Amino acid sequence: MILDQEAVDAYLEIKDLLADIVSEALKEPLARLVTLAAMTQKIWVQPVPRGYGCKLVSRGSPR
């Protein structure tokens, strides 16, 4: 999936919203784990685009 800078910004905002919703909806420790995963993805993607956008890829499951 190729994202321009606007889409990357929206993706990062969605990660914040997801973390907020999950922390309210799930019980511990699952809420903390899902929130941590969302924030980790955000931290990983945030520096990549540098104003140009980026490509999100998935390696899928190992075979």
Image (tube, rainbow, N blue to C red):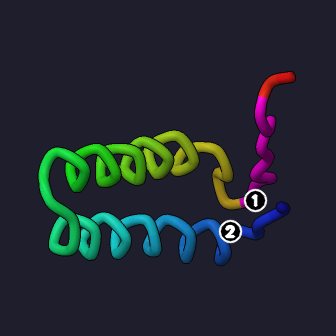
Label placed on residue 5: 2
Label placed on residue 52: 1
> Closer to the camera, 27 or 59?
27
Sequence-wise, the earlier of marks 1 and 2 is 2
Majority secondary structure of magenta residues: loop
User: In the rendered structure, are the residues bearing label 1 and label 2 in contact, judged by CB atoms less than 8 Å apart?
Assistant: yes
- Identify the image quadrant of residue 9: bottom right
Tell me residue 53's x, y (percent): 74, 60
- Whether residue 56 appears in magenta in the rendering, the answer is yes
Tag 1: amino acid: Tyr
- Identify the image quadrant of residue 62: top right
Tell me residue 17's x, y (percent): 34, 75
Residue neighbourhood size for the residue with mark 2, other residues' Cα within 10 Å, grouped as few (<14), some (14–19), many (≥20): some
Q: CA distance from mark 1 to mark 2?
A: 6 Å
Span colored in magenta: 52-61
> Closer to the camera, 30 or 45?
30
Give me the residue at 44% from left, 73% from top: 13
- Identify the image quadrant of residue 19: bottom left
